[in-house]
């Protein structure tokens, strides 16, 4: 039986997810909750989720952070996943979250707003399970209403200080056909991403040394995608550009600190990468 660590905030989405998974009776479930310490009433959410876990007779784990009201969405997300990953490792389980179709559309819109590259459409492509991606927010509302489920409303969802909340208003106004088209584009982009990564492996080899000549003479996009793969996506785009320049110009025997623990060592014809 698969063991799932279910991230439950107490909101409508995660409450619906937990109810669905529990009803299947096919998995061993662990309920995990993160109190980010952003809202004054967040302790009420923890008590609500704890009671929900007790109702379903499921193990419950929580953590209380003190991020403060000024914490960014990214800071909260990183802290949340760090906790979920620690629980999953300790119990040899897989993380499951309640991201749904509207969340994906929001993420695509946010990435495009920030000026992302082509990977901006290939969101949520990771080892985390997200079984609700085929559902819309409206469908989840209908589900909890049909099953008379209670949930907690996060007041920060109404705060326009957060970009996602501002984007959400526009996504909510989209018709279903438009959302479906975006989700279809995402799936195509994910497939393209896998094809590109396979081709890059064929072009550059498996290491540990790589050809300076090859990266110097291929088009910029190919070079940067290759470097992104070699450095395991640890570098920003500006860092990749500077690293590419170092590959072109560094003397034999030189080393280059690319950033984020990525170190390149050069010979006349090749370079190797160390990830610290």
Image (cartoon, rainbow, N blue to C red):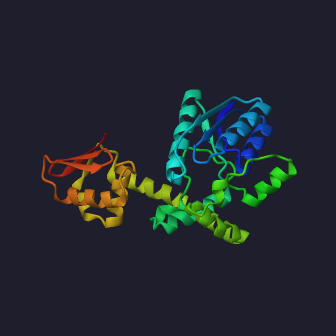
Depth order, front residue of 54/6: 54
Q: Where is residue 154 in the image (x, y as percent from the top left)?
A: 68, 52
Depth order, front residue of 75/105: 75
Please tell me in which quadrant of the rendered image residue 47 appears: top right
What quarter of the picture does the C terminus occupy?
Answer: top left
Q: Residue at 29% of width from left, 61% of height from top?
A: 241
Rendered view: 121 above or below 124: below
Depth order, front residue of 100/70: 70
- Which residue, as the protein is rendered here, is positioned at the far front? 40
Q: Position of residue 153 (x, y in %)?
A: 72, 51
Q: Where is residue 18 in the image (x, y as percent from the top left)?
A: 73, 41
Rendered view: 131 above or below 220: above
Residue 26 seen anywhere in this rendered image of the structure: no
Depth order, front residue of 236/145: 145
Q: Residue at 65% of width from left, 52% of height from top?
A: 99
Please tell me in which quadrant of the rendered image residue 108 appears: bottom right
Left or right? Give the position of 248 relative to 145: left
Residue 93 seen anywhere in this rendered image of the structure: yes
What quarter of the picture does the N terminus occupy?
Answer: top right
Q: Position of residue 271 (x, y in %)?
A: 22, 48
Left or right? Give the position of 7 relative to 256: right
Left or right? Give the position of 249 relative to 33: left
């Amino acid at each position: 039986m698969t063991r799932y660590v279910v991230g439950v905030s107490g909101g409508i989405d995660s409450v619906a997810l937990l109810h669905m998974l529990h009803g299947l009776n096919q998995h061993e479930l662990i309920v995990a909750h993160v109190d980010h310490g952003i809202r004054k009433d967040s302790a009420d959410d923890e008590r609500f989720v704890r009671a929900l876990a007790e109702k379903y007779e499921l193990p419950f784990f929580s953590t209380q952070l003190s991020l403060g009201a000024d914490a960014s969405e990214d800071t909260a997300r990183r802290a949340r996943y760090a906790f979920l990953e620690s629980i999953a490792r300790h119990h040899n389980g897989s993380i499951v979250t309640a991201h749904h179709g509207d969340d994906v559309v929001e993420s695509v819109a946010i990435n495009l707003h920030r000026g992302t590259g082509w990977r901006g459409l290939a969101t949520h492509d990771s080892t985390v399970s997200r079984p609700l991606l085929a559902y819309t927010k409206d469908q989840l509302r209908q589900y909890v209403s049909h099953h008379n489920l209670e949930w907690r409303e996060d007041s920060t969802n109404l705060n326009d200080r957060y970009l996602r909340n501002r984007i959400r208003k526009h996504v909510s106004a989209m018709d279903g056909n438009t959302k479906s088209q975006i989700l279809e584009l995402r799936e195509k982009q994910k497939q393209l991403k896998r094809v590109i990564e396979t081709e890059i492996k064929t072009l550059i080899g498996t290491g540990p040394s790589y050809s300076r000549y090859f990266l110097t003479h291929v088009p910029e996009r190919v070079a940067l995608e290759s470097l992104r793969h070699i450095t395991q996506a640890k570098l920003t785009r500006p860092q990749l550009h500077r690293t590419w320049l170092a590959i072109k110009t560094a003397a034999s025997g030189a080393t280059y600190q690319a950033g984020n623990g990525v170190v390149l060592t050069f010979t006349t014809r090749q370079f190797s990468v160390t990830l610290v």
